[in-house]
Image: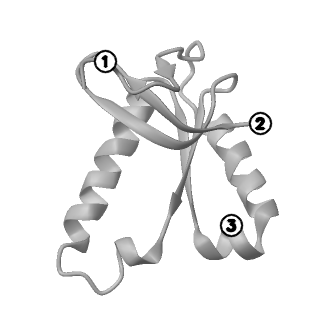
Amino acid sequence: MPLSNAWVDDGHTAYRADHLDPRAGVVLEGDGAHKYNNRPDAHKIIASRDARDRWFRGHGYGIEHYDFATARYDRPRIIQLYREAVLNRPDCPVPGNWSLARPAWL
């Protein structure tokens, strides 16, 4: 079972993952449409998400995103996304820089 709202940090930057499978080094993120739809700053939000994804991948994690419709009506797709994240994970040992507690330095 993945862990919900686990913190991943490198001592300088920290992110809270929606779902983390620490054994596989996989992060799954649930994204709501309200975050992107009909907003003048949507480009900034997408750029921030892309930077966050690069950070996770740079620290050895595989990451994929799903939306509300997928969570509600197509759960097998989430399993497929998980498998894709495993396959697309960087070729390195599974990282261990996560915790259920917020980093003390944050």
How many numbered discs sit on the rendered protein? 3
Q: Is residue 9 above or below residue 17?
A: above
The structure's colour scheme is one colour
Secondary element at tag 2:
loop
Q: CA distance from mark 2 to mark 1?
A: 26 Å
The image quarter in which residue 57 lies: top left
Kindly identify the residue that appears in the image at 71 percent across and 73 percent down: 72
Name the residue type under label 1: Ala
Query: Which label is found at residue 104?
Result: 1
Q: Which percent across, then down, holds residue 26? A: 61, 35
How many residues crowd mark 1 within 10 Å: few (<14), some (14–19), many (20+)?
A: few
Kindly identify the residue that appears in the image at 49 percent across and 24 percent down: 60
Kindly identify the residue that appears in the image at 58 percent across and 12 percent down: 93
Is the N terminus in the top left, top right, bottom left or bottom right quadrant? top right
Looking at the rendered image, the disc whose residue lies closer to the viewer, 2 or 1, is 1
Q: Which percent across, then down, holds residue 40? A: 18, 81
Q: Is residue 13 left or right of residue 23?
A: left
Q: Which residue is mark 3?
A: 71
Q: Is residue 75 above or below residue 94?
A: below
Sooner in the amino-acid sequence: mark 2 or mark 3: 2
How many residues crowd mark 3 within 10 Å: few (<14), some (14–19), many (20+)?
A: some
Q: CA distance from mark 2 to mark 3?
A: 16 Å
Name the residue type under label 3: Ala
Q: Which percent across, then down, holds residue 16? A: 43, 38
Q: Which residue is mark 2?
A: 1
Q: Which percent across, then down, holds residue 90? A: 53, 27
How many residues crowd mark 2 within 10 Å: few (<14), some (14–19), many (20+)?
A: few
Cβ atoms under marks 2 and 3 closer than 8 Å: no
Q: CA distance from mark 1 to mark 3?
A: 32 Å
Q: Is residue 88 left or right of residue 76?
A: left
Sooner in the amino-acid sequence: mark 1 or mark 3: 3
